[in-house]
Image (tube, coloured by chain):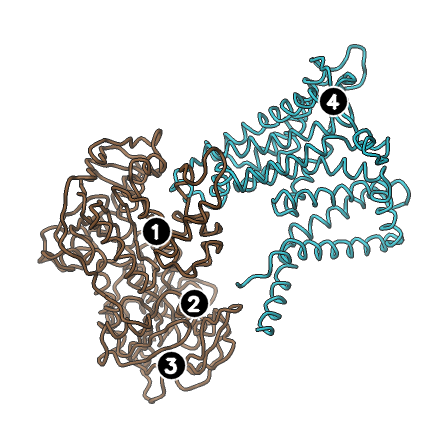
Chain colours: A cyan, B brown
């Protein structure tokens, strides 16, 4: 063995990266004349100190779980799907169509249909970039990012010209019918005797997100399809040798990835806004990249990374609300976390690895 | 300049190179352990050892790529620090790598002066280099057209440019790392003549190789390395290949494959007019005809890059072709649309690919995951959409014990096994499927001697069970000792078929160079001529 133990790799490295990012962020906060300790207290209290705070943290986390899983699945086939934003936008369109035009008797049926439509629309939006990559070699990073813009423009057109209710000045759909309203965590937990904030947007989609994590785990590590996806991701010549079609697997992996990104819409569109508005995704597609990076493309890692980013989002909003620390600085802190956990991974890993080796040699 | 080259010979009796107590560890792996050698000036010293024995690490220390953890280097009796390759060059050391470091679209002359220009203007340096090259060519039979582009030269000529580069930098000590791996036998002979001339002029040469025959042919002294240690240094005259092999592996090794006479049966594989054109429009296979019978090993000899890879790929379902291929009498689809590795396996074709690290294995997968590679849809490894990890694990454990894979740990990632053990995993996977036809490419490339012996036994055993085997190898020794019939490929064509006991390396070598029935012609000229013709054809194909 010439490497450090798995627990150090999975937990210690991101933890140290986080601490470094936090330390640097503290310096920045000191630099603008604020108190970093007070800022941290406020962030923690605002995002984890109450069920209201948790409700927002988990709401954001649910978005990031879906987009993070989307990036992770594509990455196992060695594709960088940065089109989560556009795929989630289209997912929202699918959800809106399912909720607006079919009179559902109960939310449980509505969510099934909404899931199906969200995944279908998200996957459809990923299909063309996937096809172009597989057949024509057009780089998926370029095509998916272009498709983000096309998705935004398409949504704009559809909202303004097709789905906007008559007489409304707002480029948004009508409110979804009450039967399509998803139960919030407040409603879900009340029968269990747990008091949860009524105002927080976290809803039953969180359960779907957790199911999606389990689905991705089973897909990637237990199924024949996942085996082929990983094999292709590691080596295309090897995949060809084994009779795994790179074209087929590339497209399938991207469809699954796009479907997962699209699923995000059941949380933000159906669960929270209860109508489709412009820019409903709010950058969650891009945060998904950081989440997957930090979570090492493993569903469990994605889950925890998503909660961390949910905390940063909600805590950041609280900071902006209660202190004179501007909103932009919150983005700086998030960027630092991404930089340290993603891009500067080896900066922490290499010294740590050496440290472990020295200890082991002394021990033996 | 010429005088300096001539006085390269050292009059003193100090060794040209002396290493004392060199140690180097990578993490917990001790790559070199307390190694000491002395190489006298004007001699050729061989370093032989299995893969991973530490030969390359030792030479990398000498050339300044790695820093030794302990130990000293003496050049011509003086203690010398070699922190980088610049220092190595300054100390008179030149290195010829296995993979050449030449700029393809520069001329020979430009490559030779690259990094050794005098002043800002190129013209004086080029003029000087031209003179030096002319001199070196006469002295050592190192003829290369100084104005030719590297990309137009044969591999043998490119290697000469590497040697010229080192000599131009006034190297007195030349290190050659596996220099004959890419050469035809004739080119290798020429290389050895050059090395002989260099030795006569007082240069010191270190030859790293795994081929015992080369060691016996040309070296004065030889050091054997095993697991990071230098197990012996002996005079070549006083040793034998058997003794060296034993020193390398640490036990007695059979150098020849023991096999009974074959008993060929029905034709299992029939190939007619097989033609492949690659994406660049170059015709890689030009109408191949061959067949392999049950219970027979057909060896395909040839210098690498003459279409052998494409032949294996077509038969293995990796690339499309035109022509006719029949397996057990039934023709198989070559269009590539409805055929792939999966359908080939279903037809009873096993395939040990030429490059196990790029193709045969997923290096990051554990051994147990690799055991199902290519056969992942087999219901045995799980019905429905899920894979049965327990079944794969059990299968891996069985194969590991039957094929003596070490360490027998199914959870270890493929990349953490040695080359020989990686190959055993691939061979076990393909052979135990009991294929009617086994395609096997470079079965022992980068494989240690102990594992070579084992893999050869397995191939012969499969033949004796009545299976057809198509063997592609660039190692002529391997082809000669394993094959029941030998076909030689050159430039996408079969140049001829021979029976191993009715031919010799010289005849096969000529065929490998594309020469039929002109035995009177000096070999090296014929090779050059052929290479030039091949080059022109490829250019024509590119332009057309």
The x, y position of residue B174, in whole percent, is: 35, 72
Chain to which the residue tagged by mark 2 belongs: B
- Whether callout 4 and callout 1 share a subunit is answered no
The residues tagged by marks 1 and 3 sit, at their Cα atoms, a distance apart of 40 Å
Chain to which the residue tagged by mark 4 belongs: A
Of B253 and B150, the residue lying toward us: B253
Neighbours of disc 3 within 10 Å: few (<14), some (14-19), many (20+):
some
Could you tell me which residue is drawn at 18 percent across and 41 percent down?
B290
As drawn, the label of residue B428 is: 1
> Quick check: A24 left or right of A150?
right
The x, y position of residue B289, in whole percent, is: 18, 39
Image quarter (top left, top right, bottom left or bottom right) of the N terminus of chain B = bottom left
What element does badge 3 sit on? Answer: strand
State which quadrant residue B249 falls in: bottom left
Question: Which mark's residue is nearer the viewer, 2 or 4?
Answer: 4
What element does badge 4 sit on? Answer: loop
Question: Which mark sits nearer the N-terminus, 1 or 3?
Answer: 3
Of A318 and B414, the residue lying toward us: B414
The residues tagged by marks 4 and 1 sit, at their Cα atoms, a distance apart of 57 Å
- Whether callout 3 and callout 2 share a subunit is answered yes
The residues tagged by marks 4 and 3 sit, at their Cα atoms, a distance apart of 78 Å
Chain to which the residue tagged by mark 3 belongs: B
State which quadrant residue A100 falls in: top right
Residue that mark 2 sits on: B116
> Quick check: A97 left or right of A73?
right
Residue that mark 4 sits on: A276
Question: Which mark's residue is nearer the viewer, 2 or 1?
Answer: 1
The residues tagged by marks 3 and 2 sit, at their Cα atoms, a distance apart of 30 Å
The residues tagged by marks 2 and 1 sit, at their Cα atoms, a distance apart of 50 Å
The x, y position of residue B265, in whole percent, is: 14, 43
The x, y position of residue B41, in whole percent, is: 32, 82
> Quick check: B116 left or right of A313?
left
């Amino acid at each position: 063995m010439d490497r450090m133990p798995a627990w150090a790799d999975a937990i210690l490295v991101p933890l140290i990266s986080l601490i470094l990012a936090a330390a640097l962020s503290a310096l920045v906060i000191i630099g603008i004349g604020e108190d970093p300790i007070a800022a941290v207290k406020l962030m923690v209290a605002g995002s984890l100190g109450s069920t209201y705070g948790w409700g927002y943290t988990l709401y954001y986390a649910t978005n990031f779980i879906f987009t993070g899983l989307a990036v992770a699945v594509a990455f196992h086939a060695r594709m960088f799907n940065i089109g989560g934003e556009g795929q989630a936008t289209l997912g929202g369109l699918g959800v809106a169509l399912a909720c607006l035009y079919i009179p559902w008797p109960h939310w449980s049926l509505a969510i099934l249909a909404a899931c199906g439509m969200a995944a279908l629309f998200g996957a459809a939006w990923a299909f063309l970039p996937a096809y172009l990559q597989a057949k024509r070699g057009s780089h998926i990073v370029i095509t998916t990012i272009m498709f983000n813009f096309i998705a935004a423009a398409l949504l704009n057109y559809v909202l303004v010209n097709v789905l906007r209710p008559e007489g409304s000045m707002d480029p948004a759909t009508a409110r979804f019918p009450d039967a399509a309203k998803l139960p919030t965590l407040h409603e879900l937990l009340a029968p269990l005797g747990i008091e949860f904030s009524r105002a927080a947007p976290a809803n039953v989609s969180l359960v779907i997100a957790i199911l999606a994590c389990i689905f991705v785990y089973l897909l990637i590590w237990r199924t024949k399809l996942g085996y082929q996806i990983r094999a292709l991701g590691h080596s295309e010549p090897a995949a060809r040798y084994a009779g795994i079609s790179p074209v087929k697997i590339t497209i399938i992996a991207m469809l699954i990835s796009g479907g997962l990104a699209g699923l995000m819409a059941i949380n933000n569109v159906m669960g929270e806004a209860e109508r489709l508005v412009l820019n409903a995704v709010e950058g969650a597609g891009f945060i998904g990249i950081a989440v997957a990076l930090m979570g090492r493309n493993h569903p469990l890692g994605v889950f925890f990374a998503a909660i961390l980013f949910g905390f940063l989002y909600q805590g950041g909003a609280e900071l902006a609300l209660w202190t004179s620390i501007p909103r932009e600085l919150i983005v700086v802190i998030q960027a630092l976390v991404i930089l340290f956990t993603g891009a500067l991974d080896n900066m922490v890993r290499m010294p740590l690895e050496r440290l472990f080796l020295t200890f082991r040699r002394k021990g033996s | 300049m010429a005088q300096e080259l001539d006085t390269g010979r050292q009059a003193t009796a100090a060794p040209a190179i002396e290493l004392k107590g060199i140690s180097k560890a990578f993490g917990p792996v001790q790559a070199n352990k307390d190694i000491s050698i002395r190489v006298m000036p004007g001699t050729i010293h061989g370093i032989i050892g299995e893969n991973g024995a530490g030969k390359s690490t030792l030479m990398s220390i000498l050339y300044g790529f790695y820093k030794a953890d302990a130990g000293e280097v003496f050049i011509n009796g003086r203690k010398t620090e070699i922190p980088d390759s610049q220092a190595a060059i300054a100390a008179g050391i030149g290195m010829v790598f296995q993979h050449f470091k030449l700029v393809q679209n520069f001329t020979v002359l430009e490559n030779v002066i690259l990094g050794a220009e005098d002043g800002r203007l190129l013209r004086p340096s080029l003029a000087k280099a031209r003179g030096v090259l002319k001199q070196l060519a006469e002295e050592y039979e190192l003829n290369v057209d100084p104005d030719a582009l590297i990309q137009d030269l044969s591999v043998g000529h490119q290697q000469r440019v590497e040697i010229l580069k080192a000599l131009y930098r006034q190297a007195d000590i030349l290190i050659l790392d596996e220099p004959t791996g890419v050469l035809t036998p004739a080119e290798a002979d020429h290389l050895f003549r050059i090395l002989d001339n260099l030795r006569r002029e007082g240069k010191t040469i270190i030859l790293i190789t795994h081929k015992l025959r080369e060691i016996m042919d040309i070296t004065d002294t030889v050091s054997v390395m095993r697991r990071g240690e230098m197990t012996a240094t002996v005079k070549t005259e006083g040793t034998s290949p058997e003794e060296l092999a034993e020193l390398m592996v640490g036990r007695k090794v059979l150098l020849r494959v023991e096999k009974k006479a074959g008993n060929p049966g029905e034709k299992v594989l029939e190939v007619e007019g097989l033609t492949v054109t690659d994406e660049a429009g170059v015709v890689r296979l030009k109408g191949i005809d061959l067949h392999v019978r049950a219970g027979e090993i057909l060896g395909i000899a040839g210098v690498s890059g003459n279409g052998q890879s494409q032949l294996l790929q077509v038969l293995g379902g990796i690339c499309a072709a035109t022509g006719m291929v029949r397996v057990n009498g039934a023709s198989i689809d070559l269009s590539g649309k409805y055929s792939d590795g999966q359908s080939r396996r279903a037809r009873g074709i096993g395939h040990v690919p030429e490059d196990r690290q790029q193709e045969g294995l997923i290096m990051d997968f554990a051994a147990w995951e690799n055991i199902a590679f290519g056969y992942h849809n087999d219901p045995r490894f799980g019905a429905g959409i899920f894979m049965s990890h327990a079944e794969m694990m059990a299968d891996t454990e069985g194969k590991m014990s039957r094929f003596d894979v070490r360490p027998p740990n199914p959870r270890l990632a493929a990349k953490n096994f040695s080359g020989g053990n990686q190959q055993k995993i691939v061979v076990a996977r393909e052979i135990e499927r009991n294929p009617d036809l086994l395609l096997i490419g470079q079965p022992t490339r980068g494989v240690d001697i102990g594992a070579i012996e084992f893999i050869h036994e397995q191939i012969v055993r499969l033949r004796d069970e009545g299976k057809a085997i198509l063997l592609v190898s660039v190692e002529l020794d391997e082809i000669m000792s394993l094959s029941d019939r030998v076909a030689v490929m050159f430039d996408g064509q079969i140049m001829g078929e021979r029976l191993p006991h009715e031919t010799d390396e010289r005849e096969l070598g000529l065929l490998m160079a594309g020469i039929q029935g002109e035995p009177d012609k000096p070999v090296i000229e014929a090779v050059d001529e052929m290479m030039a013709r091949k080059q022109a054809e490829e250019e024509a194909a590119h332009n057309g």
